Each structure stands twice: as structure tokens, then as C-alpha cells.
Amino acid sequence: MKAPRFSYVRPASLAEALRLLQEKGADARLLAGGQSLLAALAFRLSEPGTLIDISKLPELKGIAQAGNAIRVGAGVTHSALGTSDLIRSHVPLVAQAIPHIAHPAIRNRGTIGGSLAYADPAAELPACCLALEATMIAASPRGERRIKAGEFFTGLFTTALAADEILTAIELPVAAQGERAALVEIARRSGDYAMAGVAVKARVAGSAVSGVRAVFFGVGDAPVLAAGANAALEGKPVTAEAIAAAKAALARDLDPAPDQHGGPEMKRHLAGVVLERALARLSGANVEKAA
């Protein structure tokens, strides 16, 4: 199929983009990297009257440290994230996620803001932001608004962004002393969306972990913070017993719907597999089976 007819405009500033978005209302769509939107247009899943191209806005660019956070412009590409020394040094969870995102051609065009605003439940970056307790910064004619990641992802392909808001930046907390991160996913082929994946951060002291935040993707309508599994691991060494308790808790944490990959039980099984792998990577432990 071919995309429907639409008007195209490229504003020169964020202020102009906000004005256009307000004027066009529900008839408009924002074009950032376009890697999801253009496919939706081709399949007639989206039929906007106007595309507002924000890919060149200078206000959405740049990666910089601001105190204990790394501020990333919403227009920064996945490739730029992956090659940033600041991200590699201070936000290792995001650095680990980048190679899993589709293919190089898509990473060269796709943006962090586009991924978060699209809110695909099988995408890596929304899960990373929830695990890291990132802050999203949105602009509108009313001013700037800060939204915690825990409040940002509200459902299947939906976020807390208002119709007249543009996501402008993301603040990613700098990893604390002793904090480690791991991202593990299972996909049919490299570059495919994950059948199940997990993004985890935790403080590691000796063999024990604390402050555990395991967030699953590909197993729900949005990224899922596994509260039960996190509690089962809190303050404990990463042993076979602790992992088994965390995996058992996923039966309460996760309520996956069946999809083209399989049913709920398969999804929960895969979630347990990626969690165990991530914990082994996180702790560096050689987990032995309990006697």
C-alpha cells in the first residue's frame, strides 16, 4: 500500500512547531526519525492531514551532563546514543540497549524521543527509562512539564503526553557508585522486536543486590516494573534460591496477552529466562542449583 496524501511542513524552531501543532490539532502528526510513523502511513494505520517534521530542530539535539543526570535531547538518534561517551560511562543500561534496536539503518534515523513517544511495549528504551526512573520533559504553549517515567507510559502505544505537547528531552540519572545494569532479550532474529526482554539496574555489594529495578518489555501493554520479583531479590545474594523466588513472583507481576509469538505461559517462561540471565550478568555470579 501507499501512504495517504498529506501536507508536510518543517518548522525552524520549537516555538513554531508548537504553534503548528496547536493549529492543526488532531489532524497533525509529528515526524521525528519516522522509522515507525512512515511504516504506519504505508499501511494506512495512520492518516494525518499534516506531518510536522521536527527532526532538525536544534532545541531537540545534544547530550550533556547536568548535575547527577545526563540530559538527552529527544531528537538524538539511537546511533548517537550508542557512540556517546557520556552514555557509555554514566548510563550503561541505555548503552547496552542500543545494539538490540532494529538495524544500523534504523538506528541512524530513529530517535530516543520518537521511541518513547511511540511507546511500543516491545521496545527497549521505554523499559530502560522506567528502570532508571528517568524524567521526560515536554513543552507546550503552556510551558514546560516534567513527567516521571513511571507516569509517562500509560498503555498500549499511549503516553501521558497531551495532544499539544512535544517531548523535548529526557533526563537519565547518572549511575551511582556500586550500581550495575543489564539488558537481556530474546528475539527470533537479530533486530526483531523482543518476544520478551528485561532491563535491570541494582546496587551490588559483595554478592548481594539492593535497589533492584527489573522492568520487562514485550510481555504487556507497556513496560512492566516487576514489583514482586524485585522484592524477592532485595538485599539477597544472587543464588539459585533467590532467582527461583524472583521467577515465581513473575506469575503475579506479569499478565501477558497472547501474540504472534505464543501464549501467556510461554511469555512468562521467557521472562524468567531473561531475568535469570540478566541477574547472572549483573552480579557476575556463577549461580549453582540449590542442593
Image (cartoon, rainbow, N blue to C red):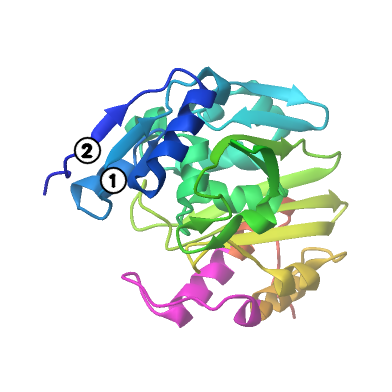
Quick one: 131 or 236, which is closer to the camera?
A: 131
Where's residue 44, x and y in %? 20, 53
In screen coordinates, is 277 left or right of 132?
Answer: left
In screen coordinates, is 41 left or right of 170?
Answer: left
Residue range in magenta is 250-274
- Mark 1 Cα shell of 10 Å, populated few (<14), some (14-19), many (≥20): some
Residue under label 1: 48
Residue under label 2: 6
Q: Residue at x 62, y 54 (%)?
A: 152
- Outermost residue to the front: 23
Q: Secondary structure at mark 2?
A: loop
Where's residue 220, x and y in %? 50, 69
Looking at the image, is 36 positioned above or below residue 89?
A: below
Q: Secondary structure at mark 1?
A: loop
Q: Residue at x 36, y 23 (%)?
A: 10
Q: Is residue 65 visible?
A: yes
Q: Amino acid at mark 2?
A: Phe
Q: Which quadrant would residue 250 be assigned to in this image?
A: bottom right
Reply yes or no: does residue 111 show up in magenta. no
Check the picture and name the quadrant holding the C terminus.
bottom right
- Outermost residue to the left: 1
Where's residue 214, x and y in %? 68, 60
Circles 2 and 1: CB atoms closer than 8 Å: yes
Q: Amino acid at mark 1?
A: Pro
Q: CA distance from mark 2 to mark 1?
A: 6 Å
Looking at the image, is 275 positioned above or below residue 255?
A: above
